[in-house]
Image (cartoon, coloured by chain):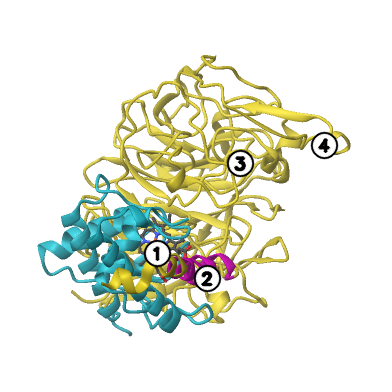
Amino acid sequence: MNYGISKMPGRMRAFVAIAIASAMLITIFSTGCASSRRDALVARQVNVSNRQLEIGQRVFMAECNQCHPGGAAGLGPAINNKPIPGFVLRFQVRHGLGAMPKFGHSQISSEALSDLVLYVKTLRHEPMLVARQ
Amino acid sequence: MIVSRFGPVALGLALLLILAGQSGCSRIRPSDGGAQARFKSPRRVDARDVQVPAGYRVQVVSAGLTFPTGVAFDDQGRAYVTESGYSYGEKWRPARLVRIEDDGSKTIIAQSNPTPWNNGPWNGVSFYQGSFYVAEGGEMYGGRILRIHMDGKIDVVIDHLPSFGDHHTNGPVIGPDGMIYFGQGTATNSGIVGADNANQGWLNRFPEFHDIPAHDVTLRGENVTSTNALDVSQAQLTPVKTGAYSAYGVWTWRGEVIPGAVPCTGAVMKAPLDGKGLEVVAWGLRNPYGLAFSPDGQLFATDNSYDVRGARPIYGTGDLLWKLNDDGRWYGWPDYFAGEVVSNRDRFQAPGTAAPKKLLAVDPNPPPRPDAIFPVHSAACGLDFSHSQDFGYVNQAFVAEFGDLAPSTGKVLAPVGFQIVRVDVKTGVSQVFAANRGRKIEPASKEHGRGLERPIAVRFDPSGKDLYVVDFGVITERGGKTDPRPNTGVLWRITRESR
């Protein structure tokens, strides 16, 4: 299975190559099979402070939250415990490597995907904002 | 340049590595669900182990309940809990309605004994004009809606509901119109009776049972062939071919019309308080478990989605929240998930299984989209709406996520559910409202804590100031055995302390 890469135009191929290289690095260095380091993410209350994040959050809730609840592991692996570059995220969403489905432009437009990427990044930075009593 | 440095072979290799690293990872990693824990009774509870937003406080109201499923309040504001009398893992007890006294002690109001003691589970309760309305699941004799008087006398309001299959009669709530609304789950996972239903026990008891549509449906004639699950001796010899909305071993042809009937399966129905004149509010649901009216009088339901099991497994479908229009509309089961057709193999085919095929030749109406989607295997159950500024989050839905039963219902990489979420039904955004403290959200039994186990129902008291949470108790999964623990259920209360 080569995902039709050989048929892609040059720029696309370069992009794919970079994506693949980064994904490899991420996979090898940060995920690993054994340890998924998940910090205290008990009650994530993400503050959506602007319109883009708001849209990103809605897209996340409609399309991603069911398999990556709040960014944590569930049916799919955690995506809030490691730095995933934006273009790798985009690649994963558009191509759905492994058991994950792919999402076409009719499901998530390019603009919505940008907002989604922004939102997914906040999941990583946002500490738990629910006060401990 | 980069491409030439990598070259097609290297690219292929890289892709392989990623797939090995990623998919390999999640496929090879063993399931780590919330029930995959060791538990030693008794269950200890401590409200300090439960985390809620600043300004809210958690309290234990009563502990030691057995398989509780619902809470309601009488006109003096006293709390009553249904103990279902049944749990997955085929544990039976008499179902009961108990009053929770101020000191947390329990007074039994009514018991399913001596009426059929094994026709549970009692799934949910509402109080209206001096009586309680309880849904009796109907494992053995069909689903019923019961009215329980304050003195414990039980009337049967509705009976013979088609509850012999996978899912039961649930709910009920009384609408602003004074009608009883309740949910009726489907017989099967996705429309076709299969060997999974023999494993669940009911196919042997009721080999003729199958799903019933609310209105006539025309089939595409898709059948599934399996070895004979009912006759072990013949198992390998006589393959059995079964079609949609048909009894096990009954096959269907293209263009065949299955007649609709009421009561049907996979629907929300309503009837006046005397139970006469049942009507379909919504159908094409799978297992509408929790029902609630929003402050502006709109009916909402949680709906448990498809599993990867049986004759027609469907992958990766989260539980749903629907706003139900009271116009008899169809919501998509067995051919759609959240408005998407399940024959999309990239999205819904589980690894190692056949792609689901569409069953209906004609959709009864375009399938609507849900108002929120919950995580796969979270088991979104009871819900209620905040209607008071004293509690806050007015008009948001609070939903109890019972939590996964992995690995028996499918593999998860971490526990899913075991929390209360609040949902903005206008945007579909859900946020955690109450969950155990710790590095990840999991049931108390798994993290050896004293907090929440399996929230199954939430309800605001009549004043709207307190949110009561019914916690079903501990269920563990070990060596293929589902083991629900009696006397581990808890009633919690969450109150706003400061504003």
Q: Chain of mark 3?
A: B
Disc 1 marks a residue whose amino acid type is Pro
Q: Is residue B381 above or below residue B137?
A: below
Q: Earlier in the sequence, mark 3 or mark 4?
A: 3
Residue carrying label 2? B25
**For numbered disc 4, what is the local secondary structure?**
loop
Please tell me whether mark 2 or mark 4 is closer to you in this view.
Answer: 2
Q: Is residue B324 above or below residue B31?
A: above
Asked if the magenta segment contains residue B332, the reply would be no
Disc 2 marks a residue whose amino acid type is Cys
Is the C-beta separation of discs 1 and 2 under 8 Å? no
Residue carrying label 3? B166
**Marks 4 and 1, how far apart in space?**
49 Å
- On the same chain, marks 2 and 4? The answer is yes
